Image (cartoon, rainbow, N blue to C red):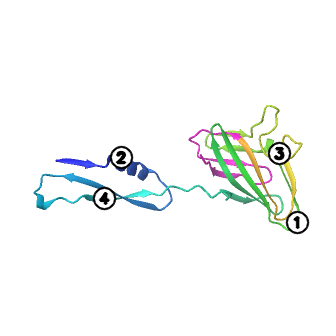
Amino acid sequence: MHKRVLLPLLIAVLVIGCKKTEEPAVTATVVTETAVATPPSAAAAPATTTVAVPAPTPAPPAGSAIVSQETNWKGITADVTEFRRKGNTLTAKVRLTNHGSENSNAAVKYGEVYLMDTGAGKKYEVLKDEKDNYIAYLTSGWSYQWYDSMKPNETITLWMKFPAPPAEVKAITLQLPGMAPFEDVPIQD
């Protein structure tokens, strides 16, 4: 007896089926043909098997918040909109929005900003360039900070670069001054 199985499709279904996601499953049908010596009048029909294949996890829409929280600055909320590891660096983007009815002063000194890998007990600080300036969104004329008086409904997106944690680290804590830590922020690869 000779069996012909669509091996590459079966392997792909098994590999994809082993990954755990929280998205609803999509089904796929695997067709197996069996060649058996049977009389011409009794030809065998292909057998079908239905296998659950998880749907891929979509990336968050551009500009949407991964995590959000209130800050200690009156009326201002902070949204982490990007937390992407690429090569040896991790870029964090934090959108500040003044939802209040009056101006609110906000400031970030990058020497107080860091990532904390609590599992490994490792701290990652914002990177600096060869002139000792932080590689981050800086207020003009300053090498170590951003500050502004934000008007009502004004939005500003800060960004900063860190050394990338190892690939096995999938989430990490982001600490910025003027707000509680963003705990276990998922890292986008």
- Residue 2's x, y, as percent? 19, 47
Q: Which residue is mark 3?
A: 138
Between disc 2 and disc 3, whose residue precedes? 2
- Residue 43's x, y, as percent? 16, 59
- The Cα atoms of the two marked residues, 4 and 3, are separated by 58 Å
Tell me if residue 85 comes above or below residue 105 in the rendering. above
Between disc 4 and disc 1, whose residue precedes? 4
Q: Mark 1 near mark 2, Cβ–Cβ under 8 Å? A: no
Q: At label 4, which amino acid type do we have?
A: Thr
Task: Based on the picture, tell me whether residue 183 belongs to the magenta stretch.
Answer: yes
Can you tell which mark lies on residue 49?
4
Q: Mark 1 near mark 3, Cβ–Cβ under 8 Å? A: no
Between disc 4 and disc 3, whose residue precedes? 4
Query: In this figure, what is the number of numbered marks?
Result: 4
Q: Quadrant of residue 140?
A: top right
- Residue 57's x, y, as percent? 53, 55
Q: Nearer the viewer, residue 72 or 29?
A: 29
Callout 3: 10 Å neighbours few (<14), some, many (20+)? many
Q: Which residues are magenta?
A: 162-189
Between disc 1 and disc 2, whose residue precedes? 2
Q: At label 3, which amino acid type do we have?
A: Leu
Task: Based on the picture, tell me whether residue 118 belongs to the magenta stretch.
Answer: no
Q: Mark 4 near mark 3, Cβ–Cβ under 8 Å? A: no
- Return the residue found at the far top: 130
Can you tell which mark lies on residue 102?
1
Residue 115 seen in this snapshot: yes
- The Cα atoms of the two marked residues, 2 and 4, are separated by 15 Å
Callout 4: 10 Å neighbours few (<14), some, many (20+)? few
Between disc 1 and disc 3, whose residue precedes? 1
- The Cα atoms of the two marked residues, 1 and 2, are separated by 62 Å
Q: Under tag 3, what secondary structure?
A: loop
